[in-house]
Amino acid sequence: MIKKYTSTLLNGIYILTIILFVFDWLTSFEIKNQAIKSFSYFGVMVLTPLTLVWNLWAFKSKKWKLIGSTIPTLTLIGILIIGPLKIVFSTSAWKTQKVIYQNGHLNFKKVEFQTQDIGALGYNKRTVEVIYLTDLFMLVNPVEKDIDDRVEWIKVDKEVNELRLKFP
């Protein structure tokens, strides 16, 4: 009975972690909150072998062992293809340094200059159009080339500096 609840809990947390990781890594959906992003990225790397071993040990029938080991095995292959170090260096959330444009119709739509701390390797920098879904999640798209000519964008040049760093 405890084995069943542990399996359900472990696999549930694992699937949630995989969903967050895949959405953040492969789509324009991004995790803004550092704790959630770290949980999903490190969780994928830690929970994948743990879930694989647990499912092979806990499930009795060959059918459930195969089903329970498919996603962790595919994820482990994906981690090895991407590279664990690349995943670790991507665990830092993007931080807003400056809001350049504000959409005149939608308050949650902005063009921002953002930085990402990649440890000893320095900082990644980007200017993107951001749609905030919540304080935790956002959608990010490239900035359009003719943004200065578009009437819905209002130039604000507002310093935010979430990292408290100086960038030109």
Image (tube, rainbow, N blue to C red):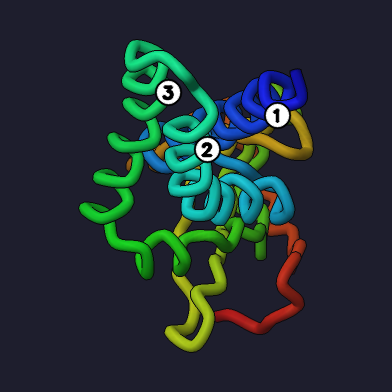
Query: Where residue 127 appears, x then y in whole percent?
Result: 47, 55
Is residue 70 toward the left or the right of residue 96 in the image? left
* Above or below, 112 relative to 67: below
| Label 2 element class | helix
Label 2 sits on residue: 54
Question: Disc 3 marks which amino acid?
Answer: Gly
The residues bearing labels 2 and 1 have C-alpha atoms spaced at a distance of 9 Å
Tell me where residue 14 sits by quadrant.
top right
User: Toward the viewer: 129 or 155?
Assistant: 129
* Above or below, 1 relative to 28: above
Query: Where residue 104 appears, x then y in whole percent?
Result: 69, 27
| Label 3 element class | helix
Question: Disc 2 marks which amino acid?
Answer: Trp
Question: Disc 1 marks which amino acid?
Answer: Thr
| Label 1 element class | helix
- Going 67% across and 39% down the picture, which residue do you hit? 102
- Going 66% across and 58% down the picture, which residue do you hit? 96
Tell me where residue 153 sits by quadrant.
top right
The quadrant of the rendering that contains the N terminus is top right
Label 1 sits on residue: 6
Residue 152 in view, yes or no = yes
Chain-order first, disc 1 or disc 3? 1
Is residue 35 toward the left or the right of residue 129 in the image? right
Tell me where residue 164 sits by quadrant.
bottom right
The quadrant of the rendering that contains the C terminus is bottom right
